[in-house]
């Protein structure tokens, strides 16, 4: 964007001085020409990423390094390092985890750098040397894609994008043959825009990038639809404190407190926003960029995008009429998740997880669990979230039983050789949980039932991070890690003191102190304070969470 571009150029220029000191120049080091990653590992992407970055600087007419010949040896050395460290079949080692891997992410970076350089290069011999070194590196990594495989769902689409990009440089027919073979498997993105890995903090944007590349460079415009779906879905994963919800991810970002990841999402919303003339996408790109600066996180720096698409340098769009949604109610049955946001307050229902409810208020959070001490099998972990006429239902059942004597003595006293299916079942027991959730204008209501076997100890657990303000009618304190409380009757108020966001938990109850050590339950959340509601089956209780914002300073009553 026009107002972002000068800052991005300045950021890229400043980063170059920091980058140079991290480039290996030792002539006896196989990794010479690439950057270390601060752990003294040098991965394939450290060289190809450097190539892409340096080519963007070299090509950018507004950079102080524009066509600076001092960049050319660095480009050549990084490209040669990519070839030198690859295996004869073109695969590479990612030292942190993967070996003999096709360098698909790296090939995308390399192709972008090569294409940018060729578009803007002059006619000097050193420029031609840099071009040829990059071309050899593209050939090497493209061969690795042809000879290698994948091991996660998203890697197929990353590889497809790399295959298309390298095909447009090399023209090898077999690259497109393999790409189309992958695509024939179908795209693993559902009608709501969710990819298999559900990784909003890492791999969703990777997939969006791949779909955009395939649609544009592979002349497959039908794939734009998958990118748009996920870009739209992401708005319903935004929380009020500038983070994205990741607790249902199937990848390494699961449960991380990820701030709007401008380094991966900014360029995608800008790219797609300009491509599709979508003001909502542009507004979000603006928001990420400006929030990152205001929060002191530093700005994203995709100079390559502006060089690749020079129209972005002067691109402007009126987004004054556009708002990023801060109220939404989204149900995704395929992912078994419900996301509800009311400004600073968000709650999330999540199946296939003992942490079935997550609440965020301001910058504070808490997580809700249930368990019963029933044969060590009654930690509530519902398989699905089902839509009902009044809201949502989650259920879970536990079964316990005893075995009797064999009708006739077994042939062997060896326990593992006995046919235990011949034993009669005695005193079979069932315990059934039913949770009905109803959305309220100012919160959410939980109707909890535990039925069948009587007198089973039960606990409802609120895992609250340390340093959250906690108040009842009689006490007020700041929570501490490892602490716990049972409120026998009434309400508790939780406050995020920094933002003034509050949640009042109504309808608490307590009948025993058997909670932290309850048999069959997961341990208390590390670093958290635990609020418990406890009782015995049968249970029929309603817990209501009320969301509010502090309107004035709270003081203790004083006599004048």
Image (tube, rainbow, N blue to C red):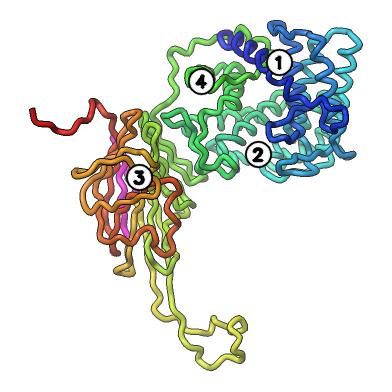
Q: CA distance from mark 4 to mark 3?
A: 40 Å
Query: According to the image, label 3 marks what residue?
Result: 391
Closest to the observer, 468 or 157:
468
Whole-angstrom CA distance, mark 4 to mark 2, is: 38 Å
Crowding at label 2, few (<14), some or many (≥20) Cα neighbours within 10 Å?
A: some
Which quarter of the figure is the C terminus placed in?
top left
The stretch in magenta equals: 436-450
Q: Which residue is mark 2?
A: 187
The label number, if any, that marks residue 399 in the structure image? none
Residue 215 percent coordinates (x, y):
69, 27
Frontmost of labels 4 and 3 is: 4
Q: Residues within 10 Å of mark 1 (few under 14, many from 20)?
A: some
- Which mark, by number, is residue 296? 4
Q: Is residue 507 magenta?
A: no
| SS at circle 2 | loop
- Residue 66 spot, x, y in % from top left: 75, 8
Q: Earlier in the sequence, mark 3 or mark 1?
A: 1
| In front: label 3 or label 1 | 1
Residue 387 seen in render: no
Kindly report the distance in space between the C-alpha atoms of the residues bearing marks 2 and 3.
31 Å
Quadrant of the image occupied by residue 104 = top right
Question: Measuring 83% from the left and 15% from the top, which residue is drawn there?
Answer: 72
What label sits on residue 308 in the rendered view? 1
């Amino acid at each position: 964007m026009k107002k972002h571009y000068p800052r991005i150029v300045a950021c890229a220029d400043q980063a170059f001085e920091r980058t140079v000191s991290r480039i290996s120049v030792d002539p006896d080091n196989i990794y010479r020409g690439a950057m270390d990653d601060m752990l003294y590992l040098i991965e394939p992407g450290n060289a190809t990423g450097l190539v892409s970055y340096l080519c963007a600087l070299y090509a950018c007419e507004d950079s102080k390094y524009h066509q600076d010949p001092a960049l050319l040896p660095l480009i050549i050395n990084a490209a040669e390092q990519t070839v030198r460290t690859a295996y004869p079949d073109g695969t590479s080692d990612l030292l942190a985890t993967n070996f003999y891997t096709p360098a698909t992410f790296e090939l995308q970076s390399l192709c972008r750098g090569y294409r940018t350089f060729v578009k803007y290069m002059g006619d000097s011999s050193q420029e031609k040397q840099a071009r040829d070194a990059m071309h050899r590196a593209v050939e090497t990594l493209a061969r690795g894609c042809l000879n290698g495989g994948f091991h996660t769902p998203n890697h197929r689409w990353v590889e497809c994008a790399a295959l298309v990009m390298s095909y447009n440089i090399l023209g090898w027919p077999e690259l497109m043959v393999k790409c189309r073979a992958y695509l024939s498997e179908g795209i693993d993105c559902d009608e709501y825009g969710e990819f298999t890995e559900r990784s909003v903090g890492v791999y969703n944007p990777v997939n969006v990038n791949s779909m955009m590349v395939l649609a544009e460079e592979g002349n497959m415009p039908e794939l734009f639809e998958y990118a748009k779906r996920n870009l739209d879905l992401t708005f319903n994963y935004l929380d009020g404190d500038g983070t994205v919800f990741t607790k249902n991810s199937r990848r390494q970002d699961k449960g991380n407190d990820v701030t709007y990841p401008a380094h991966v999402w900014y360029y995608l919303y800008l790219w797609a926003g300009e491509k599709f003339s979508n003001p909502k996408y542009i507004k979000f790109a603006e928001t990420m960029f400006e929030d990152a600066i205001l929060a002191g996180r530093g700005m994203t720096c995709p100079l390559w995008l502006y060089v690749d698409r020079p129209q972005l340098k002067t691109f402007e769009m009126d987004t004054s009429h556009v708002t990023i949604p801060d109220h939404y109610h989204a149900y995704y049955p395929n992912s078994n998740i419900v996301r509800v946001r009311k400004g600073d307050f968000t709650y999330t229902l999540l199946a296939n997880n003992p942490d079935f409810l997550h609440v965020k208020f301001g910058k504070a959070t808490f997580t809700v669990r249930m368990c019963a001490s029933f044969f060590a099998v009654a930690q509530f972990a519902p398989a699905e979230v089902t839509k009902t006429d009044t809201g949502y239902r989650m259920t879970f059942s536990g079964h316990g039983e005893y075995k009797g004597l064999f009708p006739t003595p077994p042939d062997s006293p060896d326990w593992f050789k006995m046919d235990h299916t011949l034993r009669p079942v005695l005193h079979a027991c069932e315990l059934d949980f039913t949770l009905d959730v109803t959305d309220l204008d100012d919160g959410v209501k939980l109707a909890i039932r535990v039925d069948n076997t009587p007198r089973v100890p039960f606990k409802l657990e609120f895992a609250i991070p340390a340093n959250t303000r906690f108040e009842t009618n009689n006490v007020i304190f700041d929570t501490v890690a490892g602490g716990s409380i049972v409120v026998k009757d009434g309400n508790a108020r939780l406050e995020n003191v920094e933002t003034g966001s509050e949640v009042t938990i109504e309808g608490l109850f307590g009948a025993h102190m058997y909670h932290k050590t309850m048999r069959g339950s997961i341990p208390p959340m590390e670093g958290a304070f635990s609020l418990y509601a406890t009782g015995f089956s049968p249970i029929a209780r309603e817990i209501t969470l009320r969301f509010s914002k502090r309107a004035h300073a709270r003081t203790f009553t004083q006599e004048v």
